Amino acid sequence: APFTFGQFTHGRKAYDVHHQVTLSGNRDTFYSFGVFDLSKSDLTIVLPDSKGRYFTLMPISQNHDVYLGLNAPGTYTFKQSEIGTRYIIFVVRILVDPNDPKDVEAVHKLQDGIKVIQADKGDASGLQDWDEKSMLEMRKAYNILGSAASSSANFFGVKCQNSYLDKAMGVAVGWGGMQEKDALYLPEQVAKNDGKWKFPKAVEVK
């Protein structure tokens, strides 16, 4: 879906593993993303009642402070003075059975039920135009370091919860990852992960 600043863009179908906008996207989750400017006015987001379905709104500051996911239906207000940066991005995750058309329709309604209230949406003029070449070089180095970590436990947090190095590794290895209280990511890979091996459909979870 095309991205529009100041509102949510919703993924309406199962994650395309061949065109991933984030690392390790889940096929049983529909994602929504939104980037907002907090400098002109506060931002209020209203979440609908998911009736027990997994539904979380995760705020991320411009400095990549990752806040705990907000799961309960209700009204949430975000201020620049509290977040600490002009811009904020949100990642919404909603559990779905992509093979069930009725379930897909139900999740679409939940996505459409997310309300955004902001008197002045501001603009994207303050976003930096990063040097992509040097950024990719730095990310490659942090990826090497991050891949040696036993888990993502120290990668994602708010301000003083993690070091600059841990945060940088988290951005490189798994941008959009959640705090340990919400999810824990392990860097292990399955055997024969060569893109050719046909894995069984049923996998035992221990």
Image (cartoon, grey):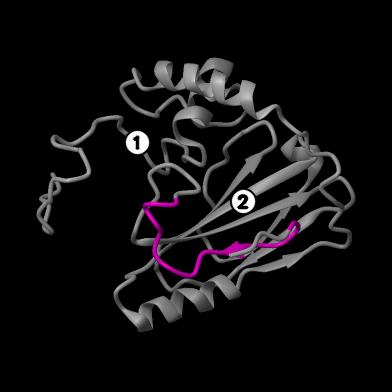
Give the image location of residue 104, x and y in percent.
Answer: 40, 76
Toward which corner of the image does residue 74 lie, by quadrant? bottom right
Residue hosting label 1 = 185
Q: Which residues are magenta?
A: 5-19
- In front here: 22 or 157? 22
Report if the CB atoms under discs 2 and 1 are less than 8 Å apart.
no
Please tell me which residue is depicted at 39% across the width and 68% down the height of the picture. 53
Side (left or right) of 15 relative to 59? left
Please tell me which residue is depicted at 80% across the width and 42% down the height of the picture. 80
Amino acid carrying label 2: it is Phe
Residue 101 counted in the magenta span: no
Toward which corner of the image does residue 34 lie, by quadrant? bottom right
- The relative height of residue 85 versus residue 160 in the rendered view (above or below) is below
Please tell me which residue is depicted at 65% across the width and 29% down the height of the picture. 132
Side (left or right) of 66 relative to 29? right
Residue hosting label 2 = 90
| Image disc number at residue 152 | none
State which quarter of the image contains the C terminus: top left
